[in-house]
Structures are given as C-alpha cells and as structure tokens.
Image: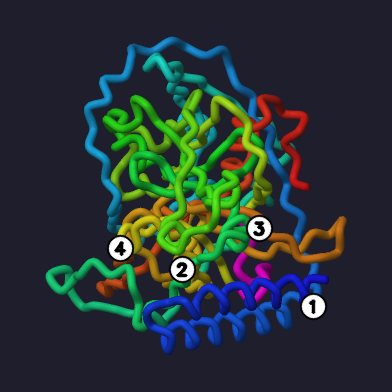
Amino acid sequence: MEVARLFNCVIRVFCSSTMSPNPGLAHSTTSVLLLSLVLHLTLSSRAPHHPVPVHLPSLVPHAPLPLSRSRFSAQTQLEFTTHCNFSCYYKGEQESGHDHLTEQLAFETLYADGSRTLTTVDFETEDHFEGTIAPAVRPPPSRGPRTTGRHRRQKRQIYGADGRFNIRGDHFLLDYPFSTAVRISTGCSGVLVSPRHVLTAAHCLHDGKDYVKGARKLRVGFLTPPYINGTKPDMSLAKNPPVRWVRVKRTRVPKGWIQGPQEVSMDFDYALLELRWPHRRPFMRLSVAPSADDLAGKRVHFSGFDSDRPGELVYRFCPVEDESNDLIYQHCDARPGASGSGVYGRVWDTALERWERKVIGVFSGHQWLEINGENRDYNVAVRFTPLKFAQICYWVHGNRVDCSQD
C-alpha cells in the first residue's frame, strides 16, 4: 500500500512537471525524487534498535497573570541568523537548574484583542532531569562547510546544488504530509498539529521584546486548489493556487524566547497558534525528537513557503549533520519564508510497529557555530526535548492527561 501510494505521488509530480517551462530540469527533478522515495522505502522497511524509553515530565500551570496590552511595535524578521560558541553548543537542560527551567517554560498568551497573560509553570518528573535528555551531546562533526574567520562569513542557506522540490498539482498539494503545511500572514510557514493548532517559529511573531506589527491581525493561510471551489482548473492558478485565510484566536510563546539571551534564543524559537475555527485537513502528530540514529535514514524533512518561490509550496529533505540538546543542525536548502516549517522525521512507533511521520522540531533559521576557532554554518531547527514537548502538548490539549508520548 505504501509503495503504491508513493509511486502514485511520483506519477502526479511527473505529470505536473512536464508542463514546466524547463522540461529537462523537470525530468531530472522527478528522477531524483523517485530515487529518494525508493531509497526511503528501503530504509523505512527495517525496524530500528529499541531506543531507551524517554520519561515525559508533566507540566503544571499556575493561574494566568494579566499583562499590559501589546504595542505591536516590532518589525518582522524573516531571515533569522544567530551565532553560537562552545558554551552555547554544550548548554542543555541537564546543566540548567529547576528554577531557571521553569522560568523558560513559562509562557505568554496573546489574544485577538491585543490583551496578554503570563502563565508560570512547574513540572513533575520522577527522576528530575536524569533520563529526560536525548541524545547525549557529542562533539561537532568534522564534516561540513567551514570558514576560518568571522570576516569571511556569508549568509548561506543553499548548500551546493539546490535540492528543493516545488510541490505542484491540485491533488498533490492536498496529499499528506504536504497538506499539513500552511502560510503565516507575517511571511513565514507553519504546520498543522491538531484540528485547531498551528506550530510556527516565535521570531515570525515576536522579536524577543514585543510582537511584530503583523501579529495584531494574525492569520493562517491554507492553499486551496481551484477544483475545491468547484471551478475549472486553470494553468495560471495551478502554479499559484489561491489561499484561504483563517484568523488566529490566540498565540502562545515560551518565556525562554521573550527577552532571552541572543546566543541561546534559538533554543525556544517556537510558538503555537490557535485558529478561530477548526480545519478539516489531516495534521501531523508531535514527538520528542529522538537521536538522529533513531530516525529513518537519519533524515529530516520539511515543507514551507520560501520567499524566492512566491506562491509555491517547497519541500526538502536532508541528513542530520549534528545535534545538540536543543537544536538540530542540517544543510537542508532553505530561504527566508521557510522559517516556522514543521521539521519531521520517520519515527518508529513501537505500538503500531511501523515508521510514522512526526513533527520533531521547528525550522528556525541559520546559525554560525564557532568551535575551537573554526566557524561552521548550518541551517537549524529547534528540537523538541521532553520538557518542550510537555509544554506544547499542554498548549494543544489544555490538560496534562492527554500529554503522553504516543
């Protein structure tokens, strides 16, 4: 069934790509996609070794405290770049005290009328921090692009040949998992994680001090192929299908992002949006991010709306190059606008005894990692630790009972 579905997807991509103004490139792209899908099936057919079970802490929220109304004075920053050194790279939840962690996991809620509240939290865990962090931190790899000094830095989000795929075709846009990707009205991307919730990057809505101007009337955009509205498909619309916008009811941002230190702010660069009305599309479930060794093919995937390809959904996948306690380092090609995309991988589901796509992080942006005098550049995703998973799960479900690793 899985083989047939994937090959049907390839055929649809091929049919839509033959209408491309560059047929040679289209056929080449289709061949690469076909090869990747076949390889993906091969890697996904084998069950992994049994990973060590991750103990999930339980978030205990306190009564919300009212805050002053937001001024919406910040400017949207679509191209987010940070710098991290040795101490930043090795910093993790294991080295943070209980009070510091609870302060970072507190969260701010922004309502549609501009009012705000702050919810402080505590968390319960049987063994505190032991056994809650995965994977174990290891030194950065020797592979990957390097520079020898800060003055030689360049903003690099495309590594070598551009490996992104434009997702076209009415039916293909609505196929899972591409159908879970949505646009954010501030210019970023997001992913559906429940019938009413969208996960995105915090920097798309908040600059660390205040909400951006566009967050005042925040909306989420769903690509709507023409035939959905009962109209005859049009070639001009097939390339740039219309978008149906839905207003956001409330937004939640972790306190670890708000007024956080710049060198570690990427660790909490995520936010959750609650829609006014539920959607009817499939969504992708969340998971604590496993070690790269426990991902099918050690790969991550994400789809978003890159600014250099306006109106089009762009998909990419690549191997994990490195990982810290809070971040996933990779060289997936991306441009501004892709921030906030849900980064997912094939995670082995023990109960179902099969690989399942699950969101394990949020694409944040670009980071220069300086270790032992060497600068290495990566595209970076925030990885969901057990504590972050518990926080986001509480945002989605509104209780602690439903927040278990399934």
Residue 28 position, x and y percent, is 48, 88
Front-most of 259 and 354?
Answer: 354
Q: Which callout, 4 or 1, points to the residue nearer the camera?
A: 4
Which numbered circle lies on residue 166? 2
Where disc 3 sits, the SS reads: loop
Please report contact status of discs 1 and 2: CB closer than 8 Å, yes or no. no
Label 1 Cα crowd, 10 Å radius (few <14 / some 14-19 / many 20+) = few
Tell me the residue at 34%/82% (across/down).
160
Question: Type of residue at label 4?
Answer: Asp
Work out how far the residue at label 4 is from the one at label 1, CA to CA, in angstroms. Answer: 37 Å
The residue tagged 1 is 46
Residue 260 falls in which quadrant of the image?
Answer: top left
Work out how far the residue at label 2 is from the one at label 4, CA to CA, in angstroms. Answer: 12 Å
Label 3 Cα crowd, 10 Å radius (few <14 / some 14-19 / many 20+) = some
- Looking at the image, residue 173 sits to the left or right of residue 281; the answer is left
Residue 20 falls in which quadrant of the image?
Answer: bottom left
